[in-house]
Image (spheres, rainbow, N blue to C red):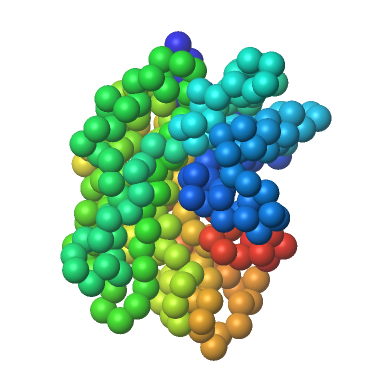
Amino acid sequence: MENLENIAEKIVEKGKGILAADESTNTIKKRFDSINTVSTELSRCDYRETLFSTTNISNFISGVILFEETFFQKNKNNESLKEKLENVNCYPGIKIDQGLEPINKDKIETYTKGIETLDERLKPFADNGAKFTKWRAVINIGKKIPTNECLEKNSSLLAKYALISQKNNLVPIVEPEVIMDGNHSLEECYKVTKKTLNMVFDSLKKQNVNLKGILLKPNMIVPGNKSNEKLDIAESAKKTLLCLRDCVSEQVPGIVFLSGGLSSVNAT
C-alpha cells in the first residue's frame, strides 16, 4: 500500500497540478446548456474521456478529482475511465462531500454535509484505487459574518473528514474557501482567511491529522467581486503568501489553489 506522505508529495510534484473534473450533474448540465449540448450519462462520459485522453497529460497533471459517476464509469469500448488515468500515472481522486446546508435560518452561512456516512462511503473508492479525496467548506464575508459558530463548525468538519480519509489511506484535500462574492476589501479578506486557516489547523491538530499527508486548497486573498477596490495582482499575491506563511504548518507538503472566480490569467 502506497504511503500517504508519498502520494501527497507526488501530487504536488514540481510543474504539475490537479485537474478538477468533479462537476456535479447539475453544474455540468449548466455548462453543457451553454454550448447547446444535452447532458446525459454518455455525453458526460465522452467529455471526461476526451480530457483524460489528452496526449502527455501526465507531464502536467498529477491527479484528477472525479465525480462519483465518473469513478466507476466505462466508455463505449467498456474501458474504465479511472483506469485510463491510472495507465498514464495520474492519480484518481474523489469529491466526497455532499454539498452545503444552511447553519441557521438566514441561509447565508453554511456547513458541508456528509460526515456521518463518510467512512462507509469512502470504502468502495479506497478499495478501487482512489488515492485522494476533496471536501469543500464555504466561508462568506458580509455584515457580521463569518460568525465563530460557522468557522468552528466548518473547521471541525474539515478535520474530521481529513482524519477519516487518512484512516482509509486517502490523502485529504482540505478546502476552506473564503469566497470572493461581496463588497469586502482586500484587507477584510486577509483577516477572515487568516482566522479561518488558523482555526482549521487548530482543528486538524486536535484530531491528530498527519499534516504531512494532507494538501491544502485555499482561496487567494482578493477584494470582493462587488468591491470598489480594484484587483491588484502583486498586492494580492503578497497578501496571500504572507497569510499562508503565517498560518500553514511547514509539515504540509503542498498548497493547491483554486481560481475562486478569477479569470485563468489573473489566477495564474
Residue 254 shown left or right of residue 194 in the figure: right
Q: Is residue 201 above or below residue 266?
A: above
Residue 266 shown left or right of residue 113 in the figure: right
Q: How many marks?
A: 0
Tell me the quarter of the picture where residue 139 sits. Answer: bottom left
Residue 133 shown left or right of residue 114 in the figure: right
Q: Is residue 181 above or below residue 204?
A: below
Residue 27 x, y percent position in the rendering:
52, 52
Instruction: Inspect this view and state whether residue 146 appears.
Output: no
Picture residue at 41% right of the left edge, 15% below the top:
127
Residue 19 x, y percent position in the rendering:
62, 40
Q: Quick one: 69 or 216, which is closer to the camera?
A: 69
Instruction: Inspect this view and state whether residue 177 appears.
Output: yes
Picture residue at 63% right of the left edge, 15% below the top:
78
Picture residue at 44% right of the left edge, 38% below the top:
95
Residue 245 shown left or right of residue 33 in the figure: left
Residue 99 x, y percent position in the rendering:
36, 49
Residue 237 x, y percent position in the rendering:
60, 65
Residue lying furthest right: 55
Q: Quick one: 252 or 63, which is closer to the camera?
A: 63
Quadrant in the picture for the N terminus: top left
Residue lying furthest top: 1
Q: Is residue 179 above or below residue 72?
A: below
Picture residue at 26% right of the left edge, 79% below the top:
144
Tell me the quarter of the picture where residue 232 sits. Answer: bottom right
Quadrant in the picture for the C terminus: bottom right
